[in-house]
Amino acid sequence: MDQDFIISLEKFMDRMGITYDVEISRDYYSRDGKQVCIHVLAYYQGEKQYDQHHCYGLRNGKVFYSEGNEIMGINDGVLAYLGKEKEIDNYFEDKARDIARNYLRWQEFN
């Protein structure tokens, strides 16, 4: 992901007071092994602006996207003003993937 865009997005969110939470919502086993779902929520003035679940698994030491659920996307809130829906979605997905990667690799060794 473009580092300049990340800096711009984070600056925009900081200036606008947009906050977000990224946390594990559930884990489970499937035929592909251990899976984990990450819930991503972004808020502006106390109202949801982004609400998605991104689920991942671990195969051959690599994290893969297994499924997801979009409750509220970029176009539904204040983040749409940036006009970079795909890039913003990728930003939040990268945050979710990092948590999933750390969790699944920790589970692999415990």
Image: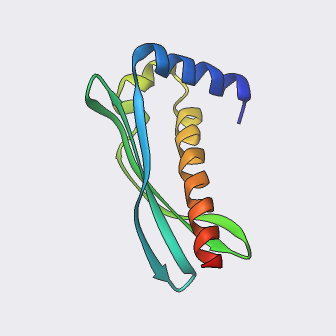
Q: How many labels does the image show?
A: 0
Q: In which quarter of the image is residue 88?
A: top right
| In the rendered image, the vertical position of residue 103 relative to residue 10, given as above or below | below
Name the residue at 51% across, 17% down. Answer: 12
Left or right relative to 15: residue 10 = right
The residue positioned farthest toward the front in the image shown: 110
Left or right relative to 36: residue 5 = right
Residue 25 position within the rendered picture, expressed as x and y whole percent measured from the top left:
38, 60
Q: Which quadrant is home to the C terminus?
A: bottom right
Residue 92 position within the rendered picture, expressed as x and y whole percent measured from the top left:
52, 41
| In the rendered image, the vertical position of residue 67 relative to residue 17, given as above or below | below
Name the residue at 57% across, 82% down. Answer: 32
Residue 50 position within the rendered picture, expressed as x and y whole percent measured from the top left:
38, 38
Left or right relative to 34: residue 18 = left
| In the rendered image, the vertical position of residue 82 relative to residue 25, given as above or below | above
Q: In which quarter of the image is residue 109?
A: bottom right
Name the residue at 45% across, 62% down. Answer: 37
Q: Which quadrant is home to the N terminus?
A: top right
Left or right relative to 110: residue 40 = left
Name the residue at 58% across, 41% down. Answer: 90
Q: Closest to the observer: 79 or 100?
A: 100
